[in-house]
Image (spheres, grey):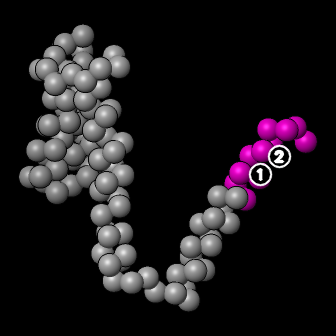
């Protein structure tokens, strides 16, 4: 077996065991209410940390101009998300806006 397959299997097992440990831990232990309240904000914080730099960075620098198609498409997607409350419409509108803006702005 090649080395890459061994590495992939070991990493897969480690990932599985890490996730399983939390499932088994939370079966027998209930975190305090403060921790449970804080954990509700983790998905929003992680998505924000991933999306905002991708929208605002252009060629390694911050770009808040109207020439940034990612920023404009992100604003359009945020407005669609706010109005429709639909992830599908948000993604479709954001991608369509980005494709049109990227083609027209260069």
**Secondary structure state at the residue bearing disc 1:** helix
Give the image quarter of residue 35. Answer: bottom left
When the figure is inspected, residue 31 is found, relative to residue 15, above or below; the finding is: below
Provide the residue designation for mark 2. Answer: 6
User: Where residue 78 sits in the image (x, y, percent)?
Assistant: 16, 44
Q: Residue furthest bottom?
A: 28
Kindly identify the residue that appears in the image at 33 percent across and 16 percent down.
59
Q: Is 2 included in the stretch rendered in magenta?
A: yes
| Viewer-closest of 22 and 85 | 22
Q: Which mark is residue 81?
A: none
Q: Specify whether residue 98 is in view.
A: no
Instruction: Tell me if mark 2 has few (under 14), some (14-19) or many (20+) residues whose alpha carbon lies within 10 angstroms of its own.
Output: few
* Magenta segment boundaries in residue numbering: 1-13
| Viewer-closest of 104 and 52 | 52
The alpha-carbon separation of the residues under discs 2 and 1 comes to 5 Å
- Main SS type for the magenta part? helix
Q: Is 77 included in the stretch rendered in magenta?
A: no
**Secondary structure state at the residue bearing disc 2:** helix
When the figure is inspected, residue 3 is found, relative to residue 67, above or below; the finding is: below
Screen quadrant of the C terminus: top left
Provide the residue designation for mark 1. Answer: 9
Cβ atoms at labels 2 and 1 below 8 Å apart: yes
When the figure is inspected, residue 15 is found, relative to residue 105, above or below; the finding is: below
Give the image quarter of residue 24. Answer: bottom right
Q: Specify whether residue 53 is in view.
A: yes
Kindly identify the residue that appears in the image at 35 percent across and 19 percent down.
60
Instruction: Tell me if mark 1 has few (under 14), some (14-19) or many (20+) residues whose alpha carbon lies within 10 angstroms of its own.
Output: few
User: Where residue 54 sits in the image (x, y, percent)?
Assistant: 32, 32
């Amino acid at each position: 077996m090649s080395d890459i397959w061994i590495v992939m299997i070991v990493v897969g097992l480690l990932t599985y065991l890490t996730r399983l440990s939390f499932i088994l831990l939370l079966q027998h232990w209930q975190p305090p209410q403060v921790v449970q309240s804080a954990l509700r904000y983790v998905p929003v914080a992680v998505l924000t940390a991933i999306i905002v730099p991708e929208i605002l960075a252009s060629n390694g620098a911050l770009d808040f101009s109207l020439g940034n198609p990612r920023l404009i498409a992100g604003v359009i997607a945020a407005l669609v998300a706010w109005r429709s409350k639909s992830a599908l419409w948000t993604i479709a509108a954001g991608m369509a806006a980005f494709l049109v803006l990227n083609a027209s702005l260069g």
